[in-house]
Structure formats: C-alpha cells, structure tokens
Amino acid sequence: MSAHTARLYHRLQIAAHRVQKAADRAVMEAAGITTAQSAVLTVTEAGAPITQRAVADQLGINESALTQMTARLMKLGLLTRTRDKADARAWLLSLTPEGRAALARIRAPFTRLNAEMDKALGDTDIDRLAADLGKIAAAFKNV
C-alpha cells in the first residue's frame, strides 16, 4: 500500500492534532504553559546556560519565533536571559526556580500521555512507529 492509498499524511495530521490538543490541555492545566513553551524550558534545562539560537536549532523553529516565546516565558518568570560573555550578540537562557517548578508539574501529564500511547500500541508497535517517524522526519529535514 502506498502513502497515498493509506492517506498517511491525513492520518498523521489527525493523530498529531489530537495528541497535541490533549498535551496542550494537560500541560496548561498543570503549569499554565503550552507544550511549545514546555519544550523551550526542557531544552534550556538540559543545556543551561544555552543560547537562544541553540534552543531554536534543537526545536527546529526560527529564532524570531523563539525570541517571542522567550519574552513570554520571561514575563511569566520562568526564564532569564543574559548576554553571552563570549559573543555579545548572543543571548543565554537559563531557568528560574519557577521554571524548574513548572517543568516538575508537567512531568505527570506527559507520563499520562505516554501511558495512553503505550496502551494504544504496545511495545513492538511503539518501537516500529518511533523508528518510522524518525525516517519520515529525516526524509523531510531539508525539504
């Protein structure tokens, strides 16, 4: 069966939309942030201090979008931004204690979402789907 015959793009869109809505709702209830904002916090926590450009690259978003998101996260008191001493043009991001607390609050909702996917697919299908999604992402990386 081809991707066209299976309506693969449509199925991916529906699945991604439903998971995204559930995740956004759960994360918003738990910490008052979106999943996109939680991704910025997660990447920042892992590499702090980390440049905005590095966060944007890891998340696959443009730097101007990240600048706007960073401003919102700073206004919420979840991130700080300082000039990089090695490169005065670059900004370094770090989490505040409130940012760390927000990340702690979203762990449970993401655990529940992942449990739903485990229940729907099982180990073998999850391994296969993860590998297949990696292949699709790689195929469209430079498109």
Image: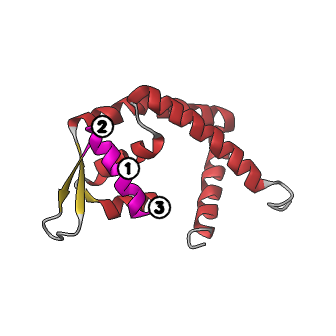
Q: Which residue is mark 3?
A: 60
Instruction: Report how far apart the C-alphas of labels 1 and 3 lie in the structure.
Output: 14 Å
The answer to which of 78 and 107 lies nearer the viewer is 78
Residue type, numbered disc 3 = Gly
Residue 69 badge: 1
Local SS, label 3: loop
Looking at the rendered image, the quarter that the N terminus falls into is: bottom right
Say whether residue 53 is left or right of residue 125: left
> Which label sits in the foreground, 1 or 3?
1
Give residue 82's quadrant in the image: bottom left
Residue type, numbered disc 2 = Leu
Local SS, label 2: loop
**Image x and y of residue 32, in percent:** 40, 31
Q: Earlier in the sequence, mark 2 or mark 3?
A: 3
Q: Dot 2, how many residues are within 10 Å of its Cα: few (below 14), some (14-19), or many (20+)?
A: few
* Residue that lies at the very extreme toward the top in this rendered image: 29
Instruction: Report how far apart the C-alphas of labels 2 and 1 lie in the structure.
Output: 11 Å
- The residue under the point 56% across, 32% down is 115
Q: Dot 1, how many residues are within 10 Å of its Cα: few (below 14), some (14-19), or many (20+)?
A: some
> Up-down: is 120 above or below 133?
above
- Magenta-tinted stretch: 60-79
Say whether residue 74 is left or right of residue 34: left
Magenta residues, dominant SS class = helix
Give residue 100's quadrant in the image: top left
Q: Which residue is mark 2?
A: 76
- The residue under the point 56% across, 73% down is 142
